[in-house]
Image (cartoon, rainbow, N blue to C red):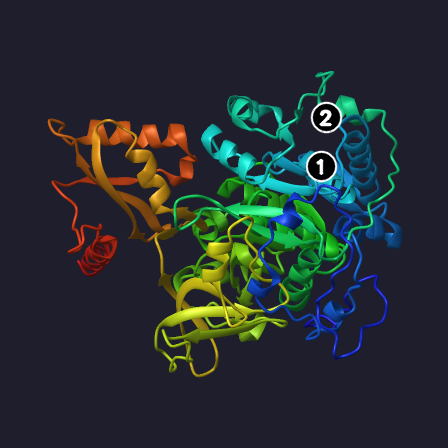
């Protein structure tokens, strides 16, 4: 049962015995074994227990997540109900099933995809992106969704790390893909959509394919997706997730906390390329029979208009996203909203209170990490405490510990560790895997405090990651790009506290001999970063310095710079 007494429609048989554990080593359906070969050794996996909730214990050892989310739901009574709305168009479950099947037949028949092959998906939120994602999973492939903002060098890294063989992308994003393609060793073909008149486009090539498809019988532990996120070392890390992980993420959070129901209309701002958006729109809503309104790019005003026009009942965004909507929210009818989720970053009490005053909804805050796929700390309804993220959700265990791995006293800052049905498995990175998992626990890298009632409050990261407007940015990655500019001698990039974004990316830059720092140079450096990596990563502030603070061994003291920025922010707030 869901948290509010609603049945969870798993479509699976009766629960397994209480002593069942998810060590389901079934024969893999993958013919291409690259990902199986590059999983970390099982001895380095965190503990993952599927016996703690009945809906998780009911998972059989073999199933295909896309079949559960699409085929099974279409056959169980939702077939003619709206699954996605996009602009003025409506796609039913049957429409999406036919589209996904045609794309799957194209992939397997004409393009030669075999189970285990990797497919990069690139687009803003769009029904064809959703159909392609389901198609890849149905065909036994592995979907690798990527942010539309990625530039060629970022695409090249991901494509080679995951040995991508196919790209399905919106035509508007073709330039960066084509620029990266010559350096992508395993890439076989790019297929574009978004132009109905293109005879080589996805729409035309799949139009005459069969609308039925023989779904691949994947194991529950077969890899379904790889999510790439910025790494603290400056290079993106690939987080591996199985078919069972997708359903577990939905059953634990969407089913037990958000309480998504048949008939709900779901909308929001996160991109499907972002694991938060992927789970919300492609997994959570379909899992419980809800319709999703897809917005290709959800500006604050467009999202407010969408809520009013579609009578949306559930909205997914970030606390920063809700804050940007506050100035205009009172001008719209938001009375249809039943649930609002603000994930990806801490929620300030002022934003919580103002949104509740205008929309009449107590916002659900949530914390998740790419390694565990979705949100695992949250609270809903009367359990919400403004200023705290919440508690561990059903299915998960969360602790805050000191350096000796002992639980901290209430109110004392420590590192958050977590275990549950999902856990960290890095792609081809055994060294990083060994550092991330300890005694079966996932080491999140987040500093938190827990109070006497078990509520968790976020403090900061333990590494060089910068959390800005819900996005994780690696300061080291931005530094690496800045150092390629001939005027930059050395630099350090840290997060600087910001009332609107939580933090902004700030660069301290020492210029090469003879160069003078001014607004024009700062603008040139910012434009250079934007030309090389995703625009959201560029330093919104640049401070020119003669030299950077160093340790006795010559290492940059980024901690001192972060402390300086916190002191400055506190001084501004008290002025």
> Total number of numbered labels?
2
Which badge, 2 or 1, is on the more N-terminal residue? 1
Q: Is residue 48 above or below residue 244?
A: below
Q: Which quadrant holds the N terminus?
A: bottom right
- Callouts 2 and 1 close, C-beta under 8 Å: yes
Q: Nearer the viewer, residue 105 or 311?
A: 105
Residue 429 to residue 437: above or below: above
Q: Position of residue 349 (x, y in %)?
A: 41, 65
Residue 132 is labelled as 1
* Helix, strand or loop under label 1: helix
Does 468 sit left or right of 178 as displayed?
Answer: left
Please tell me which residue is depicted at 41% across the width and 39% down the height of the picture.
536
Residue 202 is marked as: 2
Q: Is residue 90 left or right of residue 494?
A: right
**Residue, x 69% and y 39% (percent of image)?**
117
347 and 537: which one is in front? 537
Quadrant hosting residue 395: bottom right
């Amino acid at each position: 049962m869901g948290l509010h007494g609603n049945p969870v429609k798993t479509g699976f048989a009766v629960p397994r015995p209480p002593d069942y554990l998810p060590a389901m080593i079934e024969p893999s359906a993958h013919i291409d074994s690259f990902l199986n070969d590059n999983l970390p050794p099982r001895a380095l996996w965190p503990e993952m227990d599927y016996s703690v909730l009945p809906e998780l214990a009911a998972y059989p050892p073999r199933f295909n997540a896309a079949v559960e989310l699409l085929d099974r739901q279409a056959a169980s009574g939702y077939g003619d109900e709206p699954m996605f709305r996009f602009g003025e168009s409506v796609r039913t479950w049957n429409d999406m099933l036919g589209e996904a099947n045609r794309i799957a037949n194209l992939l397997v028949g004409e393009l030669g995809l075999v189970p285990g092959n990797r497919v990069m998906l690139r687009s803003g939120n769009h029904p064809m992106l959703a159909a392609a994602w389901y198609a890849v999973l149905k065909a036994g492939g592995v979907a690798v969704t990527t942010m539309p903002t990625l530039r060629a060098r970022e695409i090249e890294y991901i494509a080679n790390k995951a040995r991508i063989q196919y790209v399905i992308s919106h035509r508007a994003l073709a330039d960066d893909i084509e620029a990266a393609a010559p350096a992508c060793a395993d890439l076989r073909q790019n297929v574009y959509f978004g132009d109905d008149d293109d005879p080589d486009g996805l729409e035309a090539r799949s139009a005459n394919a069969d609308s039925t498809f023989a779904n691949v019988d994947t194991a529950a532990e077969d890899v379904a997706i790889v999510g790439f996120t910025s790494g603290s070392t400056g290079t993106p890390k690939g987080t591996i997730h199985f078919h069972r992980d997708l359903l577990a993420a939905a059953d634990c959070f969407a089913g037990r906390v958000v309480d998504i129901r048949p008939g709900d209309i779901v909308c929001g701002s996160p991109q499907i390329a972002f694991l938060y958006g992927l789970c919300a729109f492609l997994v959570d809503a379909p899992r419980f029979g809800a319709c999703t309104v897809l917005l290709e790019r959800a500006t604050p005003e467009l999202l407010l208009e969408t809520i009013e026009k579609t009578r949306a009942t559930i909205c997914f965004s970030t606390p920063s996203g809700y804050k940007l909507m506050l100035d205009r929210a009172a001008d719209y009818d938001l009375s249809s909203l039943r649930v609002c989720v603000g994930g990806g970053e801490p929620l300030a009490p002022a934003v919580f209170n103002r949104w509740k005053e205008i929309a009449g909804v107590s916002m659900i805050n949530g914390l998740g990490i790419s390694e565990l796929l979705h949100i695992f700390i949250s609270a809903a309804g009367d359990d919400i405490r403004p200023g705290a993220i919440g508690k561990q959700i059903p299915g998960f265990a969360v602790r805050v510990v000191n350096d000796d791995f002992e639980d901290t006293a209430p109110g004392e800052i420590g590192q958050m560790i977590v275990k549950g049905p999902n856990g960290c498995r890095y792609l081809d990175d055994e060294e990083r895997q060994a550092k991330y998992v300890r005694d079966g626990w996932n080491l999140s890298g987040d500093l938190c405090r827990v109070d006497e009632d078990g509520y968790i409050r976020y403090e900061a990261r333990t590494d060089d990651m910068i959390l800005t407007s819900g996005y994780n940015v690696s300061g080291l990655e931005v530094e690496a790009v800045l150092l390629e500019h001939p005027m930059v001698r050395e630099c350090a990039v840290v997060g600087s506290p910001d009332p609107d974004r939580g933090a902004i990316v700030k660069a301290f830059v020492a210029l090469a001999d003879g160069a003078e720092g001014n607004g024009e140079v700062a603008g040139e450096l910012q434009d250079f970063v934007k030309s090389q990596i995703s625009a959201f990563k560029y330093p919104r502030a640049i401070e020119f310095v003669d030299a950077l603070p160093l340790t006795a061994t010559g290492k940059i003291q980024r901690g001192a710079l972060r402390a300086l920025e916190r002191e400055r922010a506190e001084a501004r707030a008290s002025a």
